[in-house]
Image (cartoon, coloured by chain):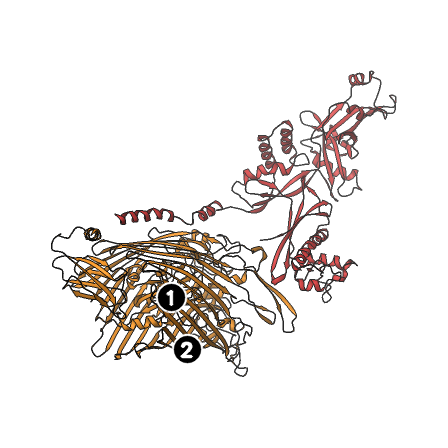
Chain colours: A orange, B red
Amino acid sequence: MKRDLLSILLIFILSGFSLSISGQKTVTGVITDAADNTPIPGVTVLVKGTTIGTISDLDGNYKINVPEGKEFLVFSYVGMKTVTLKITEDKIDVKMAAENEEIAEIMVIASFAKDRHTPVSFSTITPDIITEKLGTQEFPEILKSTPSVYATKQGGGYGDSRINLRGFDSNNIGVLINGVPVNDMENGKVYWSNWAGLSDVTKTMQVQRGLGASKLAISSVGGTINIITQTTDAKQGGSVYIATGNNGYSKTAFTLSTGLQENGWAVTVSGSKTQGDGYVRGTNFKGYSYFLNISKRLTDNQTLSLTAFGAPQWHNQRSNKHYIKTYLDHPDGILYNSDFGYRNGKVYGGGYAYNEYHKPQISLNHSWNISSLTSLSTAVYLSKSSGGGRRIVGAQSDLLSFQYPSGEPTASTLLTPDGYLDYDSVMRINQESLTGSQAVVAMSNNSHDWYGILSTLNTKVGDINVTAGIDGRYYKGYHYRVIDDLLGGKYYLDNANINRDPGTPLYKGDTISYYNVGEVLWGGVFAQGEYVLENFSAFISGSASNSSHRRTDLFAYTPEEGQVSDWQNFFAYSGKGGVNYNINKHHNVFANGGYFTRAPFFRYAFIGYTNTFNTGAKHERVLSSELGYGYRSTKMKANVALYRTKWMDKALTRSLGQEVANITGLDALHQGIEAELTYKPSTKLTVKGMLSVGDWTWEKDVAAAVYDQEQNFIDSVFIYSGGIHVGDAAQTTAALSVDAEVLPKLTLGFDVNYYDNLYAYFDVTTRVNTADIGVDAWQMPSYTLADFNVKYKFKVAGLNAAIYGKINNVLDTEYIADATDGANHDYATSPVFYGFGRTWSVALKIRF
Amino acid sequence: MKKYIIFSFMAGLLFTACNPNKDIYDAIDAAEKPYNENFDIELKDADYTSIKKLALETAQNAQDSTIANNVDTYKSFSVTRSAADLIPAFLAKNYIALDSASSINVKYKYSNNEYDSLSIITFVDDDYTALFGTVDTCFSPSFEPSDYLGTIDSTENYLVYFNCRYGNSFAEAVDTSIVYTFESGVWTNKDNFYILTDEDYESMGAPGQYHNFSASNPPEHFLPVFLHNKFPYAFSKDLVNVFYKYYSGGTKTMTDAYMFDGSVWSNTVDKISPFINNGTEWVFDPTVHYTMNASEDYQIIIDYVANNPDLSGYLDPTYPETAEYYYGASSYYKNFYLKLYKRRLYDPFGLLDGLSDEEATQALLERINEAIGIFLEGKYPDAEPIMNGVQVYYSITYNTYGENSVRNQYTVVYKCIGTGQFEYVSGPELVE
């Protein structure tokens, strides 16, 4: 009785006294999953045409007061089809089905984690969060309020951002798009500029910290970022989107869906164009993105869908960090960019300051429910990419270059009186030279082709859910440099190609400096067994893979010598397991642990830039474990996790005379605690908090004696890494956010992020100076940032529309986001990138 | 209501967000524009007057005032008029914008005259009566003027020009002028004095008219030639304190020191002293800073090893002229070689046997201290221990090439304890 009164009171308050007391009725019911009849907590129940709403409890029960004259209830939940029901009785039970079988299938392939079931730490980002909170930020920055994440824009160019998870950088984070790993095959990195259009087409995104749930042999040392793109929407219609923002930012996008037609076909297409001048000087850009999904239901049990997406872009960049004093002394302040000049009145980025890239990815997904217990999902995909970055090359390339890593000019850097790269003077020098151009503009291209297949079989054997599959890929990466602009000279001379007379005059389009091809042939198998009881689930999974590497070098070897190396094979394996126990409907605990080995990356598999095998190249190894706790109630969700990841034998090679030494023992230990809380007292208010405290250090010094083949001692190698904090990521982060619907249809959001315990980036393998033993890299100042967003829903010409406003760094805080450790480990010798000041954007989205 | 509380809490939180880089910006501002320069100056006559005025402002007693005035009178510094003490105030006033790490080499005149004040005692009849009881007496070998002087108050470096009757007996006594100084508690008869006689003045021409010098006949003009004629066989660095009469509204007896530099006599020498601004004040710093970057530097050590029969076994067998392994000097690579593999290999005395790598490296670095001493003796054979009353140190930086192919620099400090002689003080210290 009291509870009913309380509920009525609550609803009164929430609806702002706009209800009349009489003529109401109360509707209750249970909401279950159509697939397995389990109750669904957290489903939003709204009275259509009002702002009256409630949420289902842990048992799937809901209760809502419906005013007179209102006829429909709307039930919605992420990943499920929204249900609208006419109110015919006081008790209405609802069955909800997965929004889209295909999404469900992809989520299975991608090993999307399920709450209170999958024993891993994860955070899920829904598309409305992306629309409301992303603004003009880089895609990885959407994760900044989740634990153990440090994402920055680096130099600030479009797509030049990076993300570290639990202190590990991108070559230790697995990134999957629709279940397909997209880390670079040669070095494991992820270049977010390839995926600049991803924010427009993301359906949902999940970051799984630590080992994660993926069964594939991916190197999830820090974690896995799992991105699912849109597939066909059951609904016909679409949307248009227009946005404008600071520094000339503008974006237009559209989506069109046919919806699922009776003949079983469904097509969705979307496209966007984004451009702007960039917040930092000289970082203008333009990018397009396109997305196509064609789906056909072949039979009741089989669907086939083709997805193609890509994001061609070009952008000018800032690549040189500078000393703090350099920024303070420069009129442009923190917007200062040394890396460009003007040609023909337009911004022209110099070396490492212009990038263009297009990486289309096409995949064909087939999902087949073979029986009620068995399903097979297969994805066959290919990607052919092209593009590269601008470089300044030549005998006098210093004329247009800066020193690394200090960012200071070289002895011969030519700058105009205003401080821009002086292309005109260099062109004059080239014109007068009698030996061809002394400095030219070239593009360092990294094109690659890859073809792959990923096939997963899910079945049930007795009480155990068994998954098994194969993952194969062929990758070929072309790395070469091409003259783009002779900068006024008549020709260019390059002696890097042993198969070409060094006196050959070279022109635009000719290849210089290097031309090599890396091939990786990868084959892996994986399997998982999952044992599920009512309150308990446990899994064990393992994978084994063989990666074969081959290198071709067209410049350093003659065809007679042989330009193609043999195949070098590496075997790697992984094993992990976890358990989740739901103590009761509120509490659950989980634990997971695993071990995996990783084959050496391409550059360690071959010695220097040659076709010679580094026969002693060692595998890196990771041992990780995690303990977690979750609390769920109707209004509150809390997660706490403790993790411990040990990364062993980080690749360390030294060339000593004729020998190459592969040294083991360089280990890092990343451990910490993560906590997340979401408090939703009503549908109109959400409060979230996050705290992660990490202790990430390099474990001990490395002392190795190196011998030659005859066991003669050559030299000893010491790396004084012991006890040094891992750099380049904030070890303590915290976030607090409040989202409130302050007026009907008007929502305000406020996010505060705090970063601390942040040490500058340094290469641990260069810690050879005894004077630096135990000395940490420069500890950068901690900082707090605040963002604000607003959403207003309205109708225009009968169509649903919304306006989104976003201000990032509301207080215009000046802060240092990235730094490279200097000789004295202090601010005076460590060059930095500042983060952005206040930026804003306003967008309009109309759905039809 | 709840939302307003939460919003205002977050607003409060943001006050901590204001300026994360505040400490760094404050530090940069504080260190901003330490304007520094390095150059040479030469003090002109007017500058000595300025220095006198500045010194008078800070004079604590009569002695300080006298010193200050003498700077202007003599337009030079000396052992009593210390350049190290007097010049800093002048630099601080004239180069007010210069800040830490600036250095100025100041060229000034230095007088060897140790005696700024001269006491003239002339014994007259009353004095003899008072001392001896009679007028008919004189000073003699049995009662020297120094014995008399011993009875009166005196201060260190006091110069007395004593006029009296002196002889073996009263009958043989003649009027004599003798010069005494009070040094180390004893009155001594200085022998490097010369008292100009009337004939001397006449021999110089114009001064002979009144047997004195004056403004129109300055002693600096005549004495160099006179002394050259008087002491034609003088050696370089010979010093003579000349006593002469000077007329300026009355005749005074004055003294000045003249030194022979090998070709001329002069009463002052030019000296250049380095002054450094340490951030708060100017200080005289005679420390010699030298970095061993030339092959000749390391060659000094290699030659020493080669010429030492005990150590010649440590010469590099392949390159005995340019490398040795006792100290590790290499004149080809211009550094000290510290890689243990080779040092242990070429160690005929087995000095590194049984030592761990860390101990061996430490031992080698300590051995280099000795090498630096050898280097200093070879490079600065004429080094003097004291300059302007300040002890001179030598701070030598050298290059090393060691384990892990790491290149470092270390600094060792030595003290000059005698002409061309040095003593180890501290080091090695790694240069950051």
Q: From this view, report whether residue B180 is shown above or below residue B91.
A: above
Specify the amino acid type for callout 2: Gly
Q: Is residue A403 visible?
A: no
Judge from the rendering whether residue A507 lies leftward or rightward of residue A274; answer left or right.
Answer: right
Q: Is residue A611 visible?
A: yes
Left or right of A657: which side holds A551? left
The crowding category of the residue bearing disc 1, from other C-alpha atoms within 10 Å (few below 14, some 14 to 19, many at least 20), is many
In this view, the residue in front, A787 or A346, is A787
Q: Which mark is residue A711?
A: none
Q: Circle 2 sits in a helix, a strand or a loop, which is it?
A: strand
Quadrant of the rendered image containing residue B153: top right
Check disc 1 and report its element: helix, strand or loop: strand
Q: CA distance from mark 2 to mark 1?
A: 20 Å
The percent position of residue A333, horizontal first and vertical second, equals 40, 53
Residue type (three-letter) at the residue carrying disc 1: Ile
* Mark identifier at residue A225: 1
Say which mark, if any, is on residue A472: 2
